[in-house]
Image (cartoon, helix red, strand yellow):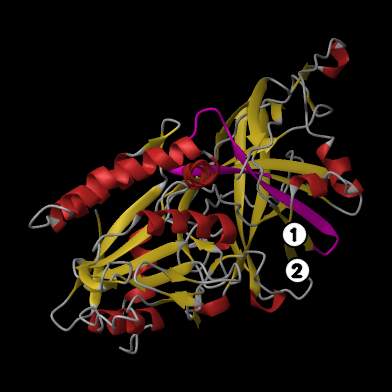
Amino acid sequence: MRKKIKISFLLLLSFIGLVFVSCELQEEAIHQHEHNSNLKLYEMKFEELMTNKKFVNSFSKLPKSKRSITNATFGRTVMENEYGFTIANKPAKVIENNGVTSYTFLITRDSTSSESFENLVIQTDSLNTTKAVIIKYNLTSPITTTEDNSYSFSSNNEITPIVYNNTQVSESSKMIIICYWITTTYCNYGGSKHIAGANCTASYMYTNSTYHCTAGDDGTMDDIPSGGGSDGGGGGGSTTSTGSNYDGSDTSIHGNGSNSINTAPVLDENAPIDHVAELKKLTNNKKDGTKTNIKLKIDELLSRLENTGSTTTTEEDGAMFDSNQNSLPPNQTGGYFTKWYGYGPEYHITLHMHQNKYWDLTATPAPVLKLTNPVPSDKDTYNLLLNFDFTNNPNSTSIIVSRLGVFALRIENQSNADNSYNQLTNNPDEIRRFQIEYDDLIMTPLGLIPSDENLALQGYISLINNYQINGENLGLVIYQAVFDSNGNIINWIKL
């Protein structure tokens, strides 16, 4: 289960400088860099970093409490505001480049929005000079995943520089300008430009820099107006940023153009993922018109729905897939189940069928042919939670093919899904309550004469959307595929 490190920091800032994106960005304020063989990006957990002397030295410089300066010769302290946040228990992205090391953390606050997330970036150089900023990404598009398990999105960004306790500003300084080059590391593995993740190798990495300035009178900071524009990541849904007309050439101004912050965004685990876009990538025809491996398997299972096997064999079947749609056949199939054993964490997509009828081999004195449950079962629901817990992949998906259609279960809220998995694994009372609710909403309508399958489907939709554990929903969402007249999947509709 994912947890958060409850380390609250009161970051004492001399200003909160917000740099807002405009859709028009000055070309001269953007630096596109070629692939850099010296660039290294990897991930480390916070507790691992706390054993790293270089990081601990930088981290210890963050302001922890307000410090007043009474000596008049020092003027006033720049620490005027206190800023509190929590570092999330999610691996930091560490970037090493030509003697400079940066650490990018996901941070959370008491009041958060699903439409944005924030990162703390701490950077140190070979001289142990440390600087830090908070970057807030206000999402302007849904988040989509990439082949190397990274992400792509667009956003309007706000930059808040952090000023350390020993930084002072004289009362005679009426204008303060602090400027940074924000250098973001991207990856073009798979042909799409996206945020670099731990799986991206150096040969696919490149950086993109944008210039940000904040300015103010007597410590009140505002962003400097920006001009003209283009996409900061070169397309593919990468992040965009604000440029500035100030070129950093005036070295008398605090923070000249030599300032540079290296980062690769670390996403909030509950930032919204575009489920429809993800499902389309799995099942829509490729650009050349051919079908994906998952769609080929869906077609195969649809063609076999009428098959009932024999009194000694059953027709239930399926496959598992990784992000590249490599498939893994089941180890065992049966009238009630499709099972896989010993699969690796890369296999986060399951696909199986509920054939129209099955032989009840337990019936006496002879097997009896019965209608199969055409909606996702209680085991299907639990197994998606199990798959997510094992693979730790937010794109964990369970696709079910039946006579009522093709359905996909996905993870909507990761922390809720974690909680649901733990409760439905370890709490006998919750397991029993869930089973009773499932039977009431789904199995009871199916047991009517004649059975009411549409009512059962509506009952399952209600279960997914409304069933609560510890006051929270299951963390799941259900979609149904939309086909055109040629049998191609053209859309997915949330139920």
Instruction: Provide the major secondary structure of the magenta segment.
Output: strand
Left or right of 429? Residue 14 is: right
* Numbered badge on residue 374: none
* Residue drawn at x 69%, y 36% as measured from the top left: 5
Q: Position of residue 96 (x, y in %)?
A: 79, 61
Snapshot quadrant of residue 437: top left
Tag 1: amino acid: Ile
- Tag 2, which secondary structure? loop
Q: Secondary structure at mark 1?
A: strand
Q: Is residue 394 above or below residue 253?
A: below
Query: What kind of residue is marked 2?
Result: Leu
> Where 400 falls versus 131 (above or below)?
below
Q: Is 388 on the left-hand or right-hand side of 404?
A: right
The CA distance from mark 1 to mark 2 is 7 Å
Where is residue 482? Give x, y as percent.
Answer: 20, 69
In percent of width and height, residue 117 lies at 53, 43
Q: Name the residue: 51% across, 60% down.
A: 387
In the depicted view, which residue is nearer to us: 172 or 123?
123
* Tag 1 residue: 95
State which quarter of the image contains the N terminus: top right
Give 200 or 250, whichever is nearer the viewer.
200
Magenta region: which residues? Answer: 97-120
Marks 1 and 2 close (CB-CB < 8 Å): yes
* Viewer can see residue 491: yes
**Mark 2 closeness class: few <14, some 14–19, many ≥20 residues within 10 Å:** some
Q: Residue at x 32, y 47 (%)?
A: 464
> Which residue corresponds to mark 2?
39
Q: Is residue 339 above or below residue 271?
A: below
Residue 286 seen in render: no
